[in-house]
Image: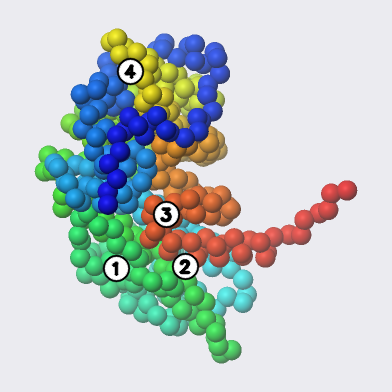
Amino acid sequence: MIRVLSLALVLGCSGDDPPGPSADVAAAAPAGFDAAVLAAAWPVRLADDAARAPFENNAGWVAVFQREYGVAMEAFAADRGDGRGLARLHVEHAAFYLEAARLAANATRHVYGTDRQPEDPPSVDYLVGVAQAVLGDCAAAAAALGTPGAQSVATGAEGRAVWSAWASAPGCPAPLDDPSAARLIGAPGAVAPGTRPVSAPLPHHSLPLGADGGAISAADPAALLLLARWHEAAARAVVPAEDAPLVDLLLAPYRLGPAVALAVPAEAPPVDVAWLFASGLLAPADVPFLAAARQQGVAALAAWSGRSPLAAALAPAVVDGKLVPDKVIDQSFALGTALEEAMAGGGRGEQGFHRPFADIARVGVLRAGAVVASAAGEERDAGILRINALDRSIGTAADPVFLISLAAWDAGNRNPLRAQELLHGLLSSFPAVEAARPPLDALQIRLARTAAPATAVH
């Protein structure tokens, strides 16, 4: 049975408070934010009781706010309304599984590529080839799949044929076509909006060890990619026609492979508040701003800071053409405080939902800062901002798409420990992400076995 719970009651019972700003940051917070920019943000728009009521009394939206995605899917499937809630949920699942596929592919290419050992059978070239294909590296995928050993795969011969053809096709990398995807292990079947398919039973592959017998059991990163494709198709099946372009804009940041330049609109498109509620995207202008920031880095701030709350928060953190992490952290608290004051304006006074709404916005600024820094090639600064965002991703501010993306980043940096912790925390809400665990666990085991002995401290 779907649990119907007032959002007001949920907010009164929200979890631990994240770290707060210093006194000087809080005091300076209201300065520098245009009232119209703040007014466009969903926390301020929903400060009004009548505007908030459709979310507050809807089981699906309450579950989204609580990050209970299974409950949310059940609720939206039972009552689709205008379709936006269900479409958004499928878009977020698609983004989640794209990042999960990145996680599994990163771990796999390290286990059997970067950290390959003499005892690994030649057949692991198949796993490396699939991982590189999922990541969009045509040359590396073709090289791995073209080795003689990659042919000795106990299962998944169809998969090898699909990815080999993909890697050698003109114009590669390009999305898999539907007939090819259907031949891969883990293809979830016909699209049924309002449901959540699972991956094929694990293990996906059994790779022979050689003449002595035995096998390596392995998961296929492509299975998670197929789940992402499925949810994207489900979103497109239910999204209102006028909102269809948003699917591409919202998924663009998570596409695998080399960055593809997306035509970013010069003006913010119409974005119903249903696409923004409880997310780090605060206003319609934040959607094209983040798309532009991934392509342009710091340069995107000038064009959007007068319209996008996220860009408005980040612009003062630029010094000598570079985003400064400490200033971004200060600005994240400043924007949150400004939003709290705006929510309390108009005689409404302070209410219980103001702090959690503002905390989601604070984390959104940190995540947006990481996007800008990464696009500018400042990976160290981007990492600092990601970790700060993680530290503040508590309770309702803990966005699962961000958390799995951080795990994928960790796996890419050969840091499986935190990635394992993050993945474990997400399994109850996204059971199909179990397919990412075998390669991540294999990476942890391999690094533990090959690590240099620690020197005793006396």
- Give the amino acid type for the residue marked by disc 2 in the picture: Val
Q: Is residue 196 left or right of residue 453?
A: left
Q: CA distance from mark 1 to mark 3?
A: 22 Å
Q: Secondary structure at mark 2?
A: helix
Name the residue beneath numbered marker 2: 128
Q: Secondary structure at mark 3?
A: loop
Residue 85 percent across, percent down from the top left? 22, 42
Q: Nearer the viewer, residue 155 or 377?
A: 155
Q: Mark 2 vs mark 3: which is more N-terminal?
A: 2
Residue 339 percent across, percent down from the top left? 37, 19
Name the residue beneath numbered marker 1: 187
Q: Residue at x 37, y 77 (%)?
A: 156
Q: Are marks 2 and 3 in contact (CB under 8 Å)?
A: no
- Mark closer to the observer (1, 2): 1
Q: Mark 1 vs mark 3: which is more N-terminal?
A: 1
Q: Secondary structure at mark 4?
A: helix
Q: Nearer the viewer, residue 401 or 198?
A: 198
- Give the amino acid type for the residue marked by disc 1 in the picture: Ala
Name the residue beneath numbered marker 4: 343
- Give the amino acid type for the residue marked by disc 4 in the picture: Met
